[in-house]
């Protein structure tokens, strides 16, 4: 089980009904699901929102766009473990309501709306929909994914009015006039004024009584104004009305028409690994001219955050280098310790691989801790070696051998104390601090062996030249 979230005794439930569903029908589905959820004793409370989204209560969980076809629950549980158990239990309820798309969402530290998002951008809606359908087919064939959908939403039924311009112009009616007439009768109306109930504005709108319950069968017989409003005639005399299916929603991103295909990843799988597999499959899709494809979700957020993390890590390395240079007053020894910082990666990688833990932000904090531990032990060993060379006139080989042998115990003790000290962090199973504890635990133990084996050899090879120069200078002085 891969942990990539902050532990929290809380989760969200999002219910999406088909576009155009009344809020009453959405509320019926929401109430039925809420009744099922409340039957579990581990549920403390359920806050329900129908037709709108909850306010922002979590830094990484952005409110959804509300509507008559949307409902949301915020569920509080008895404990963090109960949250995980309930999410596993409630997965089966996603198929209980055929018309609804139900999403049980763990409150993760990612701000992406969906963990997997593929964005198709271009000008032609036909090409965008074609590529989106191909991408959606790839996602649906991936067993690790569920709730695959796109931003186009369901097609909307509509009526196409084709005006006979020869007849309409004889009556003084143009396309623009007909559009305005129909918009007034069947649109959202015209705002005339506003009334206030306390701090809430109530708009006063002028609209037709047919605007909220228009019957397509009656549209042909609807009266439209002609001859500048002097007379009215049925719409069927000057136009044809044909049923059509319209695009459910046309989205734009950075000014470009964009269709986003998104999906959820089963919680026992690594999002980054699943996304990497999808990239290989989607590469086989041939994109039409003028259509581009990009990735969002957790992959985009990871790519945005990684430069800042790496720059902070680089700053830490530079500071460590200057501290070493100030201490040893020897650039070769400082560079040797700096290069040896890469030895921390082996233990950290081994620990994350064995425990199947996702690399997170706190893992980098653990790496910085390991670097500090390695530098501290290196100073202990190299300082004593330099002292033996200066006072006892030993060669580099003899000095580092005696130094490593003498400093083995303190290096062992500091490494073991550091690794044992993070065991409570690992046993606490915290999604935030457990990865950091794993990096320090395995990294401190494995790096200790590198410090006592590889680093003495590196010191010997690097300082052998200075030893020969010292012996040569000493011989010249004796002569």
Image: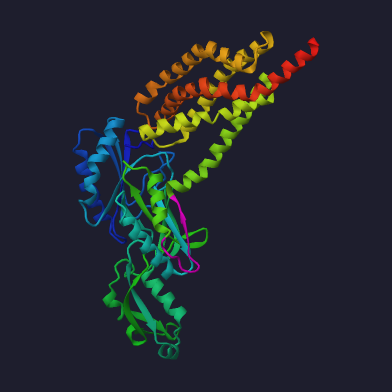
The residue shown at (45%, 47%) is 299
Where residue 301 appears, as percent x and y from the top left, is 47, 45
Position of residue 76 in the picture relative to residue 353 (left or right)? left
Where residue 350 appears, as percent x and y from the top left, is 42, 32
Q: Is residue 362 visible?
A: no
The residue shown at (51%, 42%) is 305
Q: Is residue 406 magenta?
A: no
Position of residue 402 in the picture relative to residue 115 (left or right)? right
Quarter containing the N terminus: top left
Q: Relative to 384, does residue 245 appear above or below in the rendering?
A: below
Front one among 19 and 116: 116
Q: Quadrant of residue 478?
A: top right
Front one among 212 and 446: 446
Q: Is residue 136 visible?
A: yes
The residue shown at (39%, 24%) is 425
Q: Which residues make up the magenta segment?
A: 284-296
């Amino acid at each position: 089980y891969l942990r990539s979230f902050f532990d929290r005794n809380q989760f969200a439930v999002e219910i999406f009904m088909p576009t155009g569903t009344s809020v009453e029908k959405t509320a019926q589905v929401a109430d039925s699901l809420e009744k099922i959820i409340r039957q579990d004793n581990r549920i403390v409370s359920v806050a329900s929102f129908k037709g709108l989204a909850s306010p922002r209560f979590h830094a990484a969980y952005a409110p959804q766009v509300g509507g008559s076809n949307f409902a949301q629950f915020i569920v509080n549980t008895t404990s963090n473990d109960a949250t995980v158990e309930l999410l596993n239990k409630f997965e089966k309820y996603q198929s209980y309501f055929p018309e609804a798309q139900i999403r049980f969402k763990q409150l993760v530290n990612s701000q992406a709306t969906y963990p997997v998002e593929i964005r198709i951008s271009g000008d032609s809606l036909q090409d965008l929909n074609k590529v989106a359908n191909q991408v959606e087919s790839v996602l649906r064939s991936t067993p690790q994914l569920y709730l695959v959908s796109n931003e186009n939403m369901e097609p909307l039924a509509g009526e196409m009015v084709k005006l006979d311009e020869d007849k309409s112009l004889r009556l003084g009616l143009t396309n623009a006039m007909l559009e305005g007439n129909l918009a007034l009768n069947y649109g959202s109306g015209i705002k005339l004024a506003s009334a206030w109930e306390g701090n809430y504005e109530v708009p006063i709108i002028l609209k037709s009584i047919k605007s909220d319950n228009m019957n397509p069968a009656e549209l042909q017989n609807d009266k439209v104004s002609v001859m500048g409003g002097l007379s009215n005639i049925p719409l069927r005399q000057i136009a044809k009305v044909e049923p059509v299916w319209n695009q459910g929603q046309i989205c734009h991103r950075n000014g470009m028409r964009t269709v986003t295909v998104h999906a959820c990843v089963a919680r026992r799988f690594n999002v980054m690994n699943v996304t990497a597999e999808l990239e290989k499959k989607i590469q086989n899709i041939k994109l039409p001219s003028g259509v581009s494809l990009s990735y969002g979700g957790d992959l985009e957020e990871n790519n945005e955050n990684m430069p800042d993390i790496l720059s902070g890590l680089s700053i830490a390395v530079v500071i460590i280098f200057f501290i070493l240079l100030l201490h040893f007053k020897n650039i070769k020894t400082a560079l040797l310790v700096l290069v040896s910082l890469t030895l921390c990666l082996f233990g950290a990688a081994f620990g994350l691989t064995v425990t199947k833990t996702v690399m997170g932000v706190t893992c980098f904090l653990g790496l910085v801790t390991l670097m500090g531990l390695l530098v501290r032990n290196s100073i202990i060993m190299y300082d004593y070696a330099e002292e033996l060379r200066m006072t006892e006139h030993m060669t580099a080989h003899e000095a580092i051998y005696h130094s490593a042998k003498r400093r083995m115990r303190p290096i062992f003790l500091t490494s073991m104390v550091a690794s044992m000290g993070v065991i409570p962090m690992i046993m606490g199973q915290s999604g935030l601090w457990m990865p950091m504890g794993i990096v320090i635990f395995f990294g401190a133990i494995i790096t200790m062996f590198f410090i006592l084996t590889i680093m003495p050899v590196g010191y010997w090879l690097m300082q052998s030249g200075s030893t020969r120069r010292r012996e040569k200078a000493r011989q010249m002085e004796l002569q």
